[in-house]
Amino acid sequence: MLNSCQGGWNEFTKSNPGIRRGRVVPEGRQSQIAFHTHLTHNINNLGVHQAIEFDKVLLNEGNGYSVYTGHFVAPVSGLYVFAWTISSGDGTCLIYDVVKNNEILVHFISDAADHNDWAVSSGTAVTRMNSGDRVWIRVSDIHVPCSHTVYGTGFGTSSFAGYLLN
């Protein structure tokens, strides 16, 4: 019985080339856009609105992420998911924004200013992007006493990732 079902599925997928691995993939659409980066060193005293440039690229399908700017540029229009983890520690903190085309999507803080251990914040954002739109993480201009330090070493590696949902 299983062999006849598998044989029927194989015949069906041969006659319907838009179906791969049981998933419908629209014709002419690049379906693999994703990036995953992290920071390999600590950065101290970041300036207001300075982008965090995650320097270790683990994945960059579609070549949308730049280590030189810290920006992800959407290669194609669609619905994108972004995730990040930002660490600070040992009496430091970082107030930051996740930004799309100079518009703030969210504000976050990693605050270990009053203690000598780690502070980690993580989040996820879903947004519709047009080809050429940019998303990045930058230091916020919120006026709170903060050292604007991000950790990339030890137990608190900071990371930034995203992918095209559809």
Image (tube, rainbow, N blue to C red):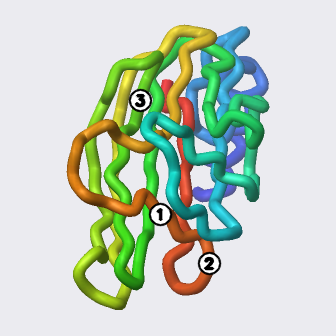
Left or right side of 113 for 1: right
Nearer-N-terminus badge (3/2): 3
Residue occupying image coordinates x 23% and y 81%: 114
Q: Classify residue 48 by image quadrant.
A: top left
Give the secondary structure at mark 2: loop
155 is higher (above) or lower (below) than 85: below
CA gap between label 3 and label 1 equals 18 Å
Q: Pick the quarter of the image with the N terminus.
A: bottom right
**Residue ID for mark 2:** 153
Q: Is residue 157 left or right of residue 12?
A: left
Q: What percent of the width, then of the height, locates residue 100?
A: 43, 23
Pick whichever, 36 or 15, lies toward us.
36
Instruction: Give whichever of 38, 24 is nearer the camera.
Output: 38
Q: Nearer the viewer, mark 3 or mark 1?
A: 1
Q: Amino acid at mark 1?
A: Thr
Badge 1 is on which residue? 149
Q: Secondary structure at mark 1?
A: loop
Residue at x-position 59% and y-position 38%: 22
Disc 3 marks which residue? Answer: 99
Which amino acid, by three-letter code, is at mark 2? Thr
Tell me how far mark 3 sits from mark 2, CA to CA: 24 Å
